[in-house]
Amino acid sequence: MILGLEWNIFFTGITSFLTDTTTKMIYAIMPLFLLSIGASKIELSLIEGVAESTASILKALSGWWSDKIGKNKPFMVIGYAITALLSPLFSIVTSPLQVLTIRFAERVGKGIRTAPRDSLIAGSSSECNKGRGFGFHKAMDNSGAIMGPLLAVAVLAVFPGDYRKVFLFSAVPGIMGLLVIILFVREAKKSKAEFLGEIKLKEFPIRYYIFLGIAFIFTLGNSTDALLLVKASDIGIQALFLPLVYLIFNSVSVIFAIPAGMLSDRIGRERLIIFGYLLYSIIYFGFGRTNDKVVIILLFALYGLYSAATDGVQKALVTDIIDKGKRGTGLGIYNSLIGITLLPASVIAGVLYDKVDNRAPFYFGSAMALIATILMFGFYRKRAR
C-alpha cells in the first residue's frame, strides 16, 4: 500500500499522469495548430473522430485478449510505448492528413492499453473500493491534463507561436510514464477459474447491453472537446490563454474525481451518472447560448465536475455488472463503443458548427444528454425495484 492505495493503482495512476501530460500538451494547442496549417473546423472534428473511432476496435480486442491469457501488463507497455514514441512526430507535420495519420497511430496505442489497464485497476481493488480506485486514476489522468497545458503555455511563452516546440518537449513525460509502467506495475493475480474461456456475448447480463445503449446515445452528443476550445477562441479568448482555460476544466475534475468515486461506492453508480448527464446537458446548452468570456470559463469549470462524476464511475459500473473473468472484455466493448461513436458525434458537431452556426452542435449535445439522463433514470429505477 502507498498512501492508502494499492501498489498497482498508485503506479498506474503515476503512469497516466505522465502520459496525459504528454497528450494534453499536444491536445491543448492542436485545434489552433490545425487551423494554422489550413484545416477547416469540419476537418478538425473529423480528424479527432476518425482517430478515436477507427482505433477503438482494438479496445475490445485487447480487453478480450488480456482476459484470455490472464495478463494486462504487456498490453499496457505496448500501448504506452506507442504514445510516448509517436507524440513528438507532430513537430514535423505540414498537412492535416499527416496529423490524422499520427493521431490514428497514437490512438492505436490507447486502444491497446485502455481495457487491460482498467481491468488491472478493477482486479487490484477490493470490491467495496472500486469507485475510489477508478476515481484516483481519473484524478491522476486529469492532473496530467493540468500539467500538460501549463507546460504548453510555458513553452509558448519562451517560443511564441512555435507549436512545434511544444510537440518536441511533449516526448519527455511520455517516456517517463513508460518507464514507470515497466519498472513498477505488477500483474493483478488471477485464479485459473477467472481466465476467459470461449466468449459468448449472450452470457453478458442484459443490464450491460442496456447501459451500453444509453452510453451510445449520450456519446452521440459528446463530440470532441476541441470544439469547446474553438468556441472559446471564437468569442475572443486569446490563443495563449486557451490552454489555461482547458486547465480549469481539468483542475476541477482532479479535485472531485476521488470524492465522486468514493461517493459512488456509497450511494450507487447510477445516481452519480444521472447527475453527470444532466449537468452535461445544462453545460452544453450554456455553451450554445452564451458569448460571454466569464460564463464560458465558468462552464469549463462545471465541465470538470461533470467529468469527475461520470468518466471513472461509468467504468466502475461496468465492472459491477460484469463477472470478474470477463471484465477486460466488457470494459473493452464499452470503451470501443464510446470511441467508435465519437466519429459520427464529431462529424455531426463539425458540420453543425461550420454549416449552421457555432451554437448548433452544443444544443444538439444538450438534447442527447437530456435523453440519456431520462433513460438512465429508468435504468436506475428498474434496478431499484
Image (cartoon, helix red, strand yellow):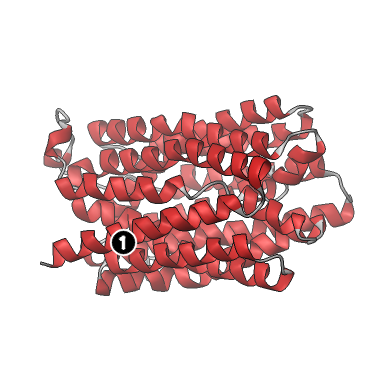
The answer to whether residue 2 is visible is no
Q: Residue furthest front?
A: 356
In-front residue for pair 96/345: 345
The image position of residue 141, as x and y in percent, is 52, 56
Quickly name the residue at label 1: 374
Q: Quadrant of residue 153?
A: bottom right
The answer to whether residue 196 is visible is yes
- Quadrant in which the N terminus is drawn: bottom left
In-front residue for pair 91/41: 41
- Amino acid at circle 1: Ile
The image position of residue 70, as x and y in percent, is 25, 37
- Quadrant in which the C terminus is drawn: bottom left
Q: In this view, does 304 lie to the left or right of 27?
A: left
In-front residue for pair 348/139: 348
Tell me the residue at 79%/27% (across/down). 94
Q: In which quarter of the image is residue 58?
A: top left
Tell me the residue at 42%/53% (across/down). 368
